[in-house]
Amino acid sequence: MNAKTLYDKVWQSHVIKDFDDGTSLLYIDRHLVQEVSSPQAFAGLAAQNRRFRRPDAHIAVADHAVPTRLRHLGLPDGLAARQVARLKENCQSFGIGYIDINDRRHGIVHVIGPELGFTLPGATLVCGDSHTSTHGAFGAIAFGIGASECECVFATQVLRQKKQRTMRVNLLGELHPGVTVKDIILGLIAKIGTNGGVGYAIEYAGPVIASLSMEARMTLCNMSIEAGSRVGMIAPDETTIAYVRGRPLAPEGALLAKAEAYWRTLASDADAKFDREVDLDVSSLSPQVSWGTNPGETAPVSGAVPDPSVETDPVKRQKMQRSLAYMDLTPGTPFEEIPIDRVFIGSCTNGRIEDLRLAASVVKGRKVADNVVAIVVPGSATVRLQAEAEGLDRLFRDAGFEWRDSGCSMCVAMNDDRLKPGERCASTSNRNFEGRQGLGGRTHLMSPIMAAAAAVTGHLTDVRKLEAI
């Protein structure tokens, strides 16, 4: 029998038919639906008088456009209100589950899927959002799709897809204090580039994985898309199973025992061959910060803004020049001398309870700098309530942070939380593209503890220089 990778095993168990052109008809187990990508799909279904193939395999929630403050007053008239109302109406019309913005289960799709047990090991899961790769942390094949594909999954529960090549990223060594999983993924993207994973399904492996929590694993897989890969995966282990067990939508009783036995078989075979292998020694990493306009333009915070003139590749040199012009940065400037205006702690990348605990440990007993506006946006209502039960909200508020309701918030300028032109933000989100957080806004990506350090100092700061972390 041929040795198989984790990706091979999950893929092959979902193939309905292989075609001569190299594509396959793939069964889709789960679909997360949100307000931005779904209207056209619902409209297409209605126009053809079609129904859902499996209504129970879909959960809908509004997360991108919703406000994160004064939500109890209702949504003001505008695009967000219309998008949320349309999603709710479509769900009622077609009979699929909808989670209201004031529901205790509300949150960002990629946070609530795992929380509810809707995300399961060995499954195929899709969503009209590129960061669907998050769910691969459970050993699922999870990827973002477009509106026409959403409609296809609505009506048929299948998609025609081309199998990806496989890449294994071996994480070696040990993380030093002040260095987190966000630094791992930023460091990896800086190493292989934003196109390094194009055409590959990435499996993260190596001794470091066993030490990572599920929250950390989700952060890792979440940003696989920033390396060009639609799919990031980690083999299920006891940490995975312990996280899933007891979740509202997870299997129970004898079915759970059967599922767990299957999940334990999904790890890549010892002699499985990958199309590409990449090693990353995390021991060599220090806290990372992005300086440009894509996640690959990242460097250790202890360094300085790079100089395009020393870049020999003319294409890369031109890209660096454009990035630095947009970011208004001068080559040679130490990163720690760059002042900031805003801090955002949240998103589907770093809005989970572990992220908030880490950030709170830095701000405890400190105050947000006078020149900084800082907000904390839990990734879900469940995270918010847990954080409040632990007193984390008081730590943030006492320090001068704003404490918000759940949602995508300042990760993407589709809501009320956005940067003004020229404002510079220390952000725990996943993208630093031009205008991503607001027209003319400048984004520096970093970990929650690094963002917290920037908030209390007023500039980019190596968190290791602060006490009690």
Image (cartoon, rainbow, N blue to C red):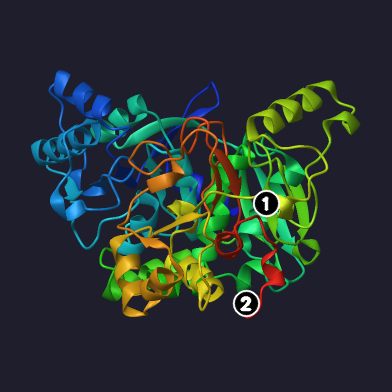
Front in this rendered view, residue 239 or 363: 363
Query: Residue at 62% across / 47% down in the picture?
Result: 202
- The type of residue carrying mark 1 is Val
In x, y percent, where is residue 39? Answer: 24, 29
In x, y percent, where is residue 165? Answer: 64, 38
Extreme residue toward the front, this view? 370
**Circle 2 SS class:** loop
Residue 469: image tag? 2
In x, y percent, where is residue 76? Answer: 17, 39
Question: Which residue is under mark 1?
Answer: 289
Front in this rendered view, residue 161 or 462: 462
Front in this rendered view, residue 156 or 65: 65
- The type of residue carrying mark 2 is Ile
Is residue 281 placed above or below 364 in the rendered structure? Answer: above
Q: Residues within 10 Å of mark 2 (few under 14, many from 20)?
A: some
| Quadrant in which the C terminus is drawn | bottom right
Is residue 110 toward the left or the right of residue 233 in the image?
left
Is residue 275 placed above or below 339 in the rendered structure? Answer: above
**Circle 1 SS class:** strand
